[in-house]
Amino acid sequence: MPHALLLNLRDTQRLAGGSERHVFRIEGRTDVVVKVMRSKYLRSLRMADDRTLLGWLKVRRAYALFRREQKALGDVMLRAAIREEMPPVMGFRGYILTEKGLGQIVEMIADENGGVAPSLHDQLQDGRVTEAQIGALNTFVAQLYDWHVVAHDLSPKNIVWNGPQARYVLVDGFGDRALLPLKSWNRRLNNRRLDRAFKEMGEKSGLTWMREKRAFARD
């Protein structure tokens, strides 16, 4: 039996599953979801003692992704506060203890009907990307450069359409994974990484990436 203070996800709908995390609904909530690390990242913690240096390092390594993302989200939200604009990434709402380990509570991006929003990948697969959405995609692209968002995985699956706000949002794949976070420190280095990532995204998605304009167009 799970501890009464832990959020029980065993009977909760799983919305998505990636190579590193699973995403679950929270019963009774339509505004947020919870992300948890896959069990393979937590196996080393079964015998870990956080009171020892080795044990604490194991804990930090298991949840390194959470820590990187929290740093990246914090930087973006600082910019949002100064600019008084909606950021191009999902909102972070805090942490919660679950029977599957520590969980991240994050904003749920909804479609026009209040359901789970489609990703750019879903829209491209179904041929549902309108000209207006291409414009919104290019606004999103410009924001990532302007807001100095460090993204290590700009897969179309990580870019989600926020229907009510008619804009794209990055829900995964951000944060500097390098031991020395040079892209976080240097805007020019990060821009070069974004250039390469969007070029690759265009090649895989069927969209044309125009490097000089840093924008997408239909093939």
Image: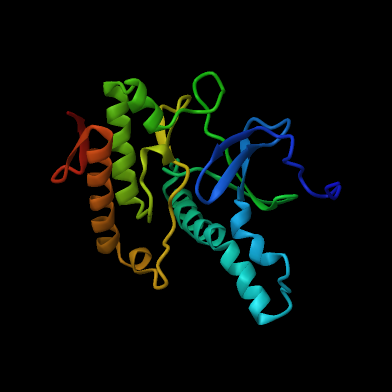
Q: Quadrant of residue 113?
A: top right
Q: Is residue 169 above or below residue 53?
A: above
Q: Quadrant of residue 124?
A: top left
Residue 63 in the image: state x and y as whole percent.
59, 61
In this picture the colour scheme is rainbow
Q: Is residue 84 above or below residue 59?
A: above
Residue 213 in the image: state x and y as whole percent.
16, 42
Relative to the observer, which residue lies in front, 215 or 120? 120
Apparent side of residue 217 relative to residue 19 in the rendered image (left or right): left
Relative to the observer, which residue lies in front, 18 or 113? 18
Name the outermost residue toward the left. 212
Residue 104 in the image: state x and y as whole percent.
62, 50
Residue 189 in the image: state x and y as whole percent.
26, 63
Which residue appears at 47% of the width and 57% of the height? 72
Relative to the observer, which residue lies in front, 92 or 175? 175
Apparent side of residue 178 relative to residue 205 in the rendered image (left or right): right
Apparent side of residue 52 relative to residue 104 in the rendered image (left or right): right
Q: Is residue 169 above or below residue 64?
A: above
Which residue appears at 28% of the width and 42% of the height? 201
Q: Quadrant of residue 167?
A: top left
Relative to the observer, which residue lies in front, 43 or 177? 43
**Figure disc tally:** 0
For the C terminus, the quadrant is top left
Name the outermost residue toward the bottom. 53
Apparent side of residue 9 relative to residue 134 in the rendered image (left or right): right
Which residue appears at 85% of the width and 50% of the height? 3
Which residue appears at 38% of the width and 56% of the height? 150
